[in-house]
């Protein structure tokens, strides 16, 4: 019989693309994984990986084995979840990874719509970088990732993306910074501006818009975490971007008013999930959300 642990090591190495990264993720020694892979290959009688320089590439047998192990560990995870459920068996769990690049208020708006399904749902939210969240999704530690870009098209990463929508974006400021901002957008010249870091897809669109408008603001802060950017904006460090649908909430909770819309600049939100035989009902609900619906505005 095949050893479940041997298969798991193979599966993680295939997802990570290297024994070293797989060892780091699993918290075991490189030699342990290498030895277990060798045992599995001897048992199967065929090589699962082919070395290409410092990289490991799946052999034809390895690609076939990955398709089966994807199903094995998806079912294994579902078994663990079923056993872990309360005695009533009524609680459904949704584990969501939220990219640090997307506005958390917007993530809340979307998830509150998706979780309004019949029955008891326990929402578990984690935050992280795009790459780390995709790795956790591939290892089935997450059911869904909300992010600002689609998943990359790679052979080993069995996930699919749903474009939830584009949300028009504007610039906001607290009353202290609103003084003198009477000729938008020209008043942005030399004005303090807070922006996402360049790893954020929205940053590219903002930079392009500033160039097209011929504007030269003073960039006083760059933030990887969108929530931290908004917090500094609330502290009047600088003018900051945010989706227009959050206008009322930003006014009530951050005392921030919109200066104007950045025409052509939009926050794009994607939902990335694994290919499962049994689709999660909350994920199905999320992927069917109309981003232009009044319920989101």
Image (cartoon, rainbow, N blue to C red):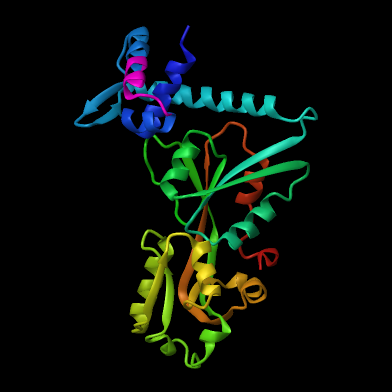
Q: Is residue 197 magenta?
A: no
The residue range painted magenta reads 27-36
* Residue at image coords 49%, 74%: 240
Judged from this view, the residue extending furthest toward the left is 53
x, y percent for residue 82: 68, 27
x, y percent for residue 4: 49, 15
Q: Quadrant of the C terminus?
A: bottom right
111 horizontally vs 196: left or right: right
Judged from this view, the residue extending furthest toward the right is 88
232 horizontally vs 95: left or right: left
269 horizontally vs 288: left or right: left
* Residue at image coords 60%, 62%: 105
Q: Quadrant of residue 212?
A: bottom left
**Secondary structure mostly taken by the magenta-highlighted segment of the chain:** helix
Between 23 and 284, the one lying in front of the other is 23
x, y percent for residue 136: 48, 38
Is residue 210 placed above or below 113 in the rendered structure?
below
x, y percent for residue 233: 51, 73
* Residue at image coords 59%, 57%: 107
Q: Quadrant of residue 221?
A: bottom left
Q: Quadrant of residue 155?
A: top left
């Amino acid at each position: 019989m095949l050893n479940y642990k041997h298969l798991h090591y193979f599966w993680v190495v295939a997802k990570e693309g290297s024994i070293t990264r797989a060892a780091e993720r699993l918290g075991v020694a490189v030699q342990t994984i290498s030895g277990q892979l060798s045992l599995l290959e001897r048992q199967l009688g065929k090589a699962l990986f082919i070395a290409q320089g410092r990289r490991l590439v799946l052999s034809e047998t390895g690609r076939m084995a990955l398709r089966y192990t994807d199903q094995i560990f998806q079912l294994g995870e579902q078994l663990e979840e079923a056993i872990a459920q309360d005695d009533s068996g009524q609680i459904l769990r949704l584990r969501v990874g939220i990219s640090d690049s997307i506005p958390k208020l917007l993530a809340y708006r979307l998830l509150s719509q998706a979780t309004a399904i019949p029955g008891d749902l326990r929402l578990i939210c984690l935050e992280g970088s795009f790459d780390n969240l995709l790795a956790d999704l591939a290892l089935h530690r997450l059911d869904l990732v909300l992010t600002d870009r689609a998943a990359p098209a790679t052979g080993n990463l069995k996930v699919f993306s749903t474009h939830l929508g584009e949300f028009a974006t504007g610039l906001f400021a607290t009353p202290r910074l609103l003084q003198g901002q009477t000729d938008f957008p020209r008043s942005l010249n030399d004005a303090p501006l807070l922006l996402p870091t360049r790893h954020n897809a929205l940053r590219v669109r903002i930079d392009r818009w500033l160039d097209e408008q011929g504007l030269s603001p003073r960039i006083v802060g760059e933030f990887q975490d969108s929530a931290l950017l908004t917090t500094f904006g609330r502290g009047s460090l600088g003018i900051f971007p945010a989706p227009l649908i959050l206008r009322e909430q930003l006014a009530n909770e951050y005392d921030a008013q919109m200066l104007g819309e950045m025409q052509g600049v939009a926050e794009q939100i994607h939902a990335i999930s694994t290919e499962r035989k049994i689709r999660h009902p909350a994920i199905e609900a999320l992927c069917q959300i109309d981003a232009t619906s009044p319920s989101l505005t």
